[in-house]
Every structure is written in C-alpha cells, then in structure tokens.
Image (cartoon, helix red, strand yellow):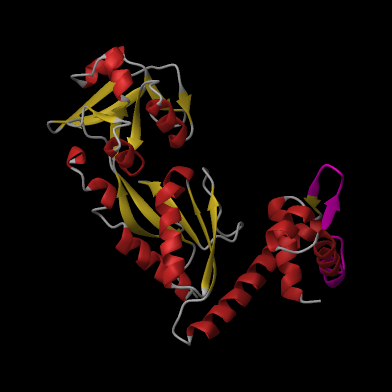
Amino acid sequence: MDKFTAIKVFLETVERGSVSAAAEHLDMSRAMASRYVAYMEEWAGARLLHRTTRKLTLTTAGTQMLPLCREMLKLAENMEATVAEREGEPRGQLRITTSAVFAHPHMTDAVVAYLAQYPATSIDLQVVDRTVNLIEERIDLAIRITNNLDPNLIARKIGMCRSVLCASPDYLHKRGTPASAQDLTQHNCLTYAYFGQSLWQFEHDGLPVSVPVQGNFSANEALVLQQAAVTGCGITMLPTFAASSLIKQGKLVPVLPEYKMADMGIYAVYASRKQMSQAVRTMIDFLVARFGENSHWDRDSFLC
C-alpha cells in the first residue's frame, strides 16, 4: 500500500474524528480507509488510535507519530509542487482558512476566480470562526482580520476592513435615526459577544468618542448580527465588506457615517517562507490584486 496515502488517511482520521469522515473527505470507502489506518499501525509497529463506539483518541505512539506524519506529508507535497512548478504553472492543493463573514461571498468568489486562472491547482477552503493552528491543521494560508498579528507567523496585507453602523429602514422608521453617537444609548444595539459588547468607540472631528450601548441580542458571528439588523431588530456594527451590498439593495441604511470606527487589516498569514509553494505565492499575489487597500466594497460614497 502507498505510504503517503496511509499518512493522509491517518491525519484526516485524527483531524475529522473518525475513519468514516476521513474516508468521505478523501473519496474512498470506509473499508479502504480502515485498511490504510491498519497499514499505518503495522508500519509504525504500534497501535496509533484508541477506537470506541463513541470516540477516537490517539495513543501515546499516535501522539508521537502525528507531528512526524504532518512533516513527512508536507515535504512530499512540496517535492511534488517543486517538480511540477518547473513547468511554469502552480499546481497542487492549497488549504486555506477564513471566517464565515469574509468567505461569503468575497473569499469564495476569489477562490473560484483563482481556480479558473490556475486550473492545475485545487483548494480546500476551511470556513471557521476561530484562530486555527496552521501547523497542526496543515493550513497553507489563513485569511485573518486583525490588528494583532501573531509575531511567530508571516503576514502580508491583502486589504482593509472598515466598519459601518447600520440598521434596516423599517427599524429607523419605527425608532428614529440617531443624530449623534450619544443617541445610541436610546436604541437597541446588536453587539458582538467577544468585542465591544457594552462600549462602542468612535472618532468624530478628530476626537475619540465612547458610548455605552445596550441591546437584547448579541452574537459571536457577524453574519448573525447582519441578518438580525436586516430583519429590523436593531442597529449593529458591520464590516463594510459585509454591509455594502445590502446598503446598495436598500436592505440596510448607514447610521452616523460621520463617526468613524477603527480600521483593521485583512492579512494572508502563513507559517514560513521556506519552501513556499508557487501556489501559495500566486494566491497571495492574486488576493492583493483583487482586494488591495482600496477594496471594491469601499468605493461607494456612503463609506467616504
């Protein structure tokens, strides 16, 4: 049996929590995946996984083998990509992670456009709203929106994330439109559970402004607050890349556009420049060209 396929099956089994899930992801039968796992254990000379009807866990030997298998697979992928790229075109699979609010539609559209330009590549897009360990989860590229980059990782800015307060026309018709930031204290403010839940901060006429806000709905995901705002629940703070199309459609209305919120960078983050594949390099260049400092979602007058 092919050892590198066995390594892939072992790693996917650990990451996805079951042989069945690994088999489905790798498009093989469960029986074949089980044989590859058994072959891995025969090759290692030890049991690598504890299996029960409820749970799959690593043995001590499995824990020791896991980082070695990740390194071996990465080296094999780099070798294949290096040989293929001598022909002048990026090849191989890219594993990319980003948040749900940026994935729909911006990163999804970017991936589709990239694949059309570089058909010898494939992309596994992992949409998760948590900070992923790039090494442990074999991620080639993470798209992160932050002003606090991990100093142990390498990052290149691919765009800007600006924010806008907005609400539905129906909500503003019923509750009135705030004339100043202080008026927000009289409104139902939809807040992020992990960020600025009770205090919204702005800059107005060059001066900092802090306003205590409250509301009956908070969430840890921007798409949830976006939908709540569209349905008339209250006023919320959204990234312009999420709000701009809804504002154009008239489903949301900017509120207090003269009050500015802190910008954040959108970064392509990766673990190392060493042996970076051509696929990673071209994807980063592609995203910079597609988004850039003056992203298309920020080119409308209501955001100026």
Tell me where residue 30 appears, x and y as whole percent: 81, 59
Looking at the image, which residue is at 34% across and 18% down?
213
Residue drawn 21% across the image and 40% down it = 303
Residue in view at x 75 percent, y 64 percent:
28
In the image, residue 37 above or below residue 85: above
Decide if residue 303 is in sight here. Answer: yes
- Asked whether, in this view, residue 208 is left or right of residue 229, the answer is left
Q: Quadrant of the C terminus?
A: top left
Q: Residue furthest front?
A: 249
**Left or right of 18: which side holds 296?**
left
Residue drawn at (61%, 71%), measured in percent from left and top?
74
User: Above or below — where is 174 with respect to 303?
Assistant: above
Can residue 154 be seen at all in this image of the molecule? no
User: At which x and y percent is residue 271?
Assistant: 49, 62
- Quarter of the image for the N terminus: give it: bottom right
Give residue 99's position: percent from left, percent from top: 47, 46
Say whether residue 43 is magenta: yes
In magenta, the rendered stretch is 40-56
The front one of 150 and 233 is: 233
Viewer-side residue, 46 vs 158: 158
Task: Establish if 279 lies above or below 289.
Answer: below
Q: Nearer the viewer, residue 157 or 258?
A: 258
Residue pushed farthest bottom? 87
Q: Nearer the viewer, residue 241 or 44?
A: 241
Quarter of the image holding residue 70? bottom right
- Based on the picture, tell me whether residue 294 belongs to the magenta stretch: no
